[in-house]
Image (cartoon, rainbow, N blue to C red):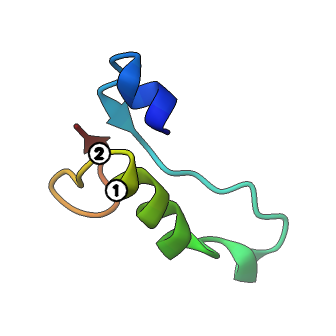
Amino acid sequence: MRWWWQEGGDAVSFGSDAHTPFRIGAKFDIAVDVVEAAGFRPGRDRLDFWRR
């Protein structure tokens, strides 16, 4: 994520490749921590694009 920010990337979105319904969104809190540490902040809500 930091590389994306350093290269001028201005938005991040989240997705899931869960193979079972109960795993959708698993560890979303960890993904949020990583994106915030790289300098991105949430848009209108936590599910919107995150921008720098």
Q: Residue at x 48, y 74 (%)?
A: 29
At 29% across and 51% down in the image, what residue appears?
48
Q: Spatial distance from mark 2 to mark 1, Cα to Cα?
A: 5 Å
Look at the numbered disc 1 and give the secondary structure of its residue: helix
Q: Which mark is residue 21?
A: none
Which element type, helix, strand or loop, lies under badge 2?
loop
Location of residue 19 (image quadrant): bottom right
Relative to 30, residue 47 above or below: above
Number of marks present in the image shown: 2
Q: Quadrant of the C terminus?
A: top left
- Crowding near the residue tagged with mark 2, few <14, some 14–19, many ≥20 C-alpha atoms within 10 Å: some
Disc on res. 39: 2
Residue 50, horizontal then vertical, whole percent: 30, 46
Q: Residue furthest bottom?
A: 22
Say if mark 2 contacts mark 1, CB within 8 Å. Answer: yes
Report the front residue among 48 and 35.
Answer: 35
**Amino acid type, label 2:** Gly
| 23 lies left or right of 19 | left
Q: Is residue 3 left or right of residue 7?
A: right
Q: Is residue 35 above or below residue 32?
A: above
Residue picked out by circle 1: 36
In this view, the residue in front, 12 or 19, is: 12
| Vertical position of residue 38 compared to residue 7: above or below | below
